[in-house]
Amino acid sequence: MFNVHTSYSSIVLESYEDLVHYFKYASSAYSLICPRPNGKHLVMTLSNPLTDIQGFVARDDQRQEIIVSLRGSVSLTDILLDIQVALVPFIAPGVKLPGTRFASLLSIQNQHIVRHIFTCCRKCRSTRRLSFRVRKTPIGRCCSILSFSSWESIAFQVLLVVEKQIEEHPGYTIVTTGHSLGGAMALFAAVNLQQKFKDIPVRTYSYGSPRSGNKIFADYVNATFGENAHRVVHGDDGVPTMIPRLLGYHHHGKYFLTSPFHKVHRRTGIEYWQYTHPASGDTTAKCDPEGEDPCCSASVPSQGVTLAHTNVSDVNDVFIEFPAQSTKYFGIMATTPFCL
């Protein structure tokens, strides 16, 4: 049962409209052909046939933004990635995460299995346009192998495209977004892009994303992005809490959407909860930015890949029909294309 409180505070209309706006990019990533994502300019389609990752880079010249949108789970390959729960080091182009001050804060796996030896392994990879340093971060096994491996498979491709756009459109900011597995990848993309383009504001929006890393990583995300990291969770969606905290995982701050009958306690921060329908700024309130607010999604035991996360008629069919994820965020099915 949810804890029901009597004090609520809605978010401003502009914030609510932004959540809806970037969800349209996330849902459009499911479309095989999307000539104008969310009505904006398509820069490049992203794909990796080995990991079956798909998405796009778009540009909004009105808002002066470069948008990276990554698709959620739609295939057996994606599902196999989804069910992997091992934590791995964050190794990605251009990334240098905090180091030895986190030495005593390893994930549960490291604490109970092996004493981690901190090393920095460097190697340089270069292309005609760009040189990256790949660093094995000394914060230990911080990140989910399921979403990090997916992001890693297209990281160079994304960074090259975004760098070119930044050069051609100085002053533009960067936004990453995605639903489900795509939301987890969007978070890693944001970390990677913020590290690479340190002077350019980066925001990230994820919807129905599973836990993507441990407490160290969540703290890093909260400290680095603050209210520029938005994570939206539907109250009937079991995927965001499917990977348990007992395995060392921890959410960063988030928005939280509930079913029609539950309400939220107002706190400062970046976690939001839609406490009734229809969805609007007046029915969406903030939760604790720490990421595991006991009054929000952490209070609801996960039922795994529920019907709210798919459109299957029988849970036993979930591994066959998992591609049709259709949780309604803001009244919009998660696979709805906005491509014209």
Image (tube, grey):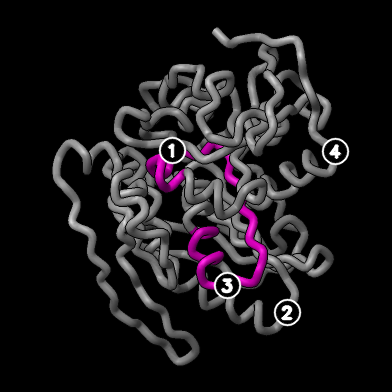
Q: Nearer the observer, disc 3 or disc 1?
A: 3
Is 157 included in the stretch rendered in magenta?
no
Q: Identify the magenta region.
A: 189-218
Q: Which residue is mark 4?
A: 13
Mark 1 and mark 3 in contact (Cβ < 8 Å)? no
| Residue 7 percent coordinates (x, y) | 76, 15
Q: Which residue is mark 3?
A: 197
Mark 3 and mark 2 in contact (Cβ < 8 Å)? no
Q: Which mark is residue 211?
A: 1
**Label 3, label 1: how far apart the Cα atoms are:** 25 Å
Q: Is residue 294 left or right of residue 106?
A: right
Report crowding for label 3: few under 14, some 14 to 19, many 20 or more residues within 10 A (C-alpha).
some
Quick one: SS at disc 4?
helix
Mark 1 or mark 2: which comes first in sequence? 2
Report crowding for label 4: few under 14, some 14 to 19, many 20 or more residues within 10 A (C-alpha).
few
Q: Which mark is residue 169?
A: 2
Q: Nearer the observer, disc 3 or disc 4?
A: 3
Q: Nearer the observer, disc 2 or disc 3?
A: 3
Residue farthest left in this picture? 114
